[in-house]
Image (cartoon, rainbow, N blue to C red):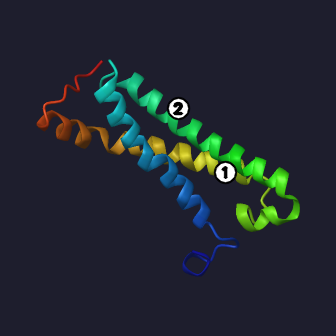
């Protein structure tokens, strides 16, 4: 990414955290539709995005715990590249990914579920 876009730092981590929001959002959405009274709509979208943020925050807390307990070797694992806002950026990109997923995919997902006979009525 540095070579392709001329970035000062490697932003591959940002793409990974975008995917950390985008991909689980659809999985969480389907699990909730299949196992809860929630159906397609605003509440489902809000809960899905919140769960993706919770997963991202848990991962950042794991990174913090590792950094705190490992001392100086944590930079190799974390990939923060000296960015003091790395955890906040990571969670922001997970939020962007989850939101993008919930803006783009639900109509396609609902059509697929309806073909399978699963109720996806609007709330």
Residue at left offset 84%, top offset 52%: 69
* For residue 79, side relative to residue 23 (left or right): right
Q: Position of residue 72 (x, y in %)?
A: 87, 64
Q: Name the residue under label 1.
A: 89
Q: What element carries label 1?
A: helix
Q: Is mark 2 on a helix, strand or loop?
A: helix
Which of the numbered marks, if any, corresponds to residue 119?
none
Q: In this view, does 20 lie above or below 41?
A: below
* For residue 93, side relative to residue 43 (left or right): right
* For residue 55, side relative to residue 60 (left or right): left
State which quarter of the image contains the C terminus. top left
Residue at left offset 22%, top offset 22%: 121
Q: Nearer the viewer, residue 99 or 19?
A: 19
Q: Which of marks 1 and 2 is in front?
A: 2
State which quarter of the image contains the N terminus. bottom right
Q: Position of residue 12 (x, y in %)?
A: 58, 67
Q: Earlier in the sequence, mark 1 or mark 2?
A: 2
Q: How crowded is mark 1: few (under 14 residues within 10 Å), some or many (20 or more)?
A: some
In three-dimensional space, the C-alpha distance between marks 1 and 2, rounded to whole angstroms, equals 16 Å
Residue at left offset 20%, top offset 36%: 113
Q: In this view, does 56 lie above or below 35?
A: below
Q: In this view, does 30 lie above or below 85?
A: above
Q: Position of residue 74 (x, y in %)?
A: 79, 61
Q: Residues within 10 Å of mark 2 (few under 14, many from 20)?
A: some
Q: Mark 2 points at which residue?
A: 50
Location of residue 2 by image quarter: bottom right
Determine contact: label 1, label 2, CB under 8 Å: no
Q: Is residue 40 visible?
A: no
Residue at left offset 77%, top offset 47%: 65
Q: Which residue lies furthest to the right in this view?
A: 71
* For residue 67, side relative to residue 89 (left or right): right
């Amino acid at each position: 990414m540095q070579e392709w876009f001329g970035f000062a730092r490697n932003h591959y981590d940002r793409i990974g955290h975008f995917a950390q929001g985008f991909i689980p959002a659809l999985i969480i959405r389907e699990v909730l539709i299949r196992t809860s009274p929630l159906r397609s709509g605003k509440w489902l979208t809000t809960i899905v995005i919140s769960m993706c943020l919770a997963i991202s925050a848990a991962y950042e807390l794991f990174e913090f715990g590792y950094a705190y307990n490992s001392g100086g070797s944590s930079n190799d694992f974390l990939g923060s590249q000296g960015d003091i806002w790395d955890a906040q950026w990571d969670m922001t990109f997970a939020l962007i990914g989850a939101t993008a997923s919930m803006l783009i995919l639900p109509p396609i997902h609902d059509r697929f579920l309806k073909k399978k006979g699963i109720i996806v009525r609007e709330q």
